Image: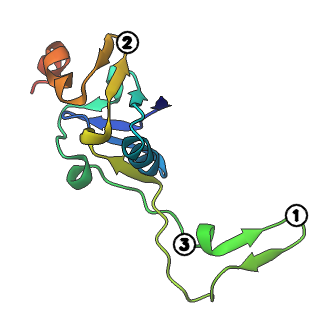
Amino acid sequence: LVIVGADRITRRGDVANKIGTYLKALAAFDNDIPFFVAAPSSTIDWKLNDGKREIPIENRSAAEVLTVRGVDQTGQLAPPDEAAANPAFDVTHNRFVSGIITERGIFAPTDLATRFQDQIANAGL
């Protein structure tokens, strides 16, 4: 069993979380291990449906992955003019999520909209 948190969840149950969560989901899926996301329902963004297309991903400074800092020294892992992507989050598609654990119970990702109709109505959607 794998349980992770979430920074944002879409209406259909796609999950944005710290970088590496997607890889954990893939590993769990490939090894038939259930993958759950634990988050309060306030994490669900009812306006978003497709996490890959609609959740903005912060891209942090390339220096964070191109430089190593020690106690007494700093080292470059690549030439100073080298470019690098450094996303802060990744998105896990709902098909890799066994269930989403909320304050109302555990639900399949695609059942969120049905189980939280009151929140959708309160959001004016």
Query: Of circles 2 and 3, which is in front?
Result: 2
Three-letter code for the amino acid on which mark 3 is drawn: Ala
Query: Of circles 2 and 1, which is in front?
Result: 2
Q: Are marks 2 and 1 in contact (CB under 8 Å)?
A: no
Pinpoint residue 81: horizontal percent, then vertical percent: 56, 89
Does 30 appear above or below 1?
A: below
Dot 2 or dot 3: first in sequence order is 3
Q: How is the image coloured?
A: rainbow
Does 15 appear above or below 99?
A: below
Report the residue at 67% width, 79% height from top: 77
Q: Which mark is residue 103?
A: 2
Q: Which mark is residue 18?
A: none
Dot 2 or dot 1: first in sequence order is 1
Report the residue at 42% width, 42% height from top: 31
Residue under pointer 1: 71
SS for tag 1?
A: loop
Residue under pointer 3: 62
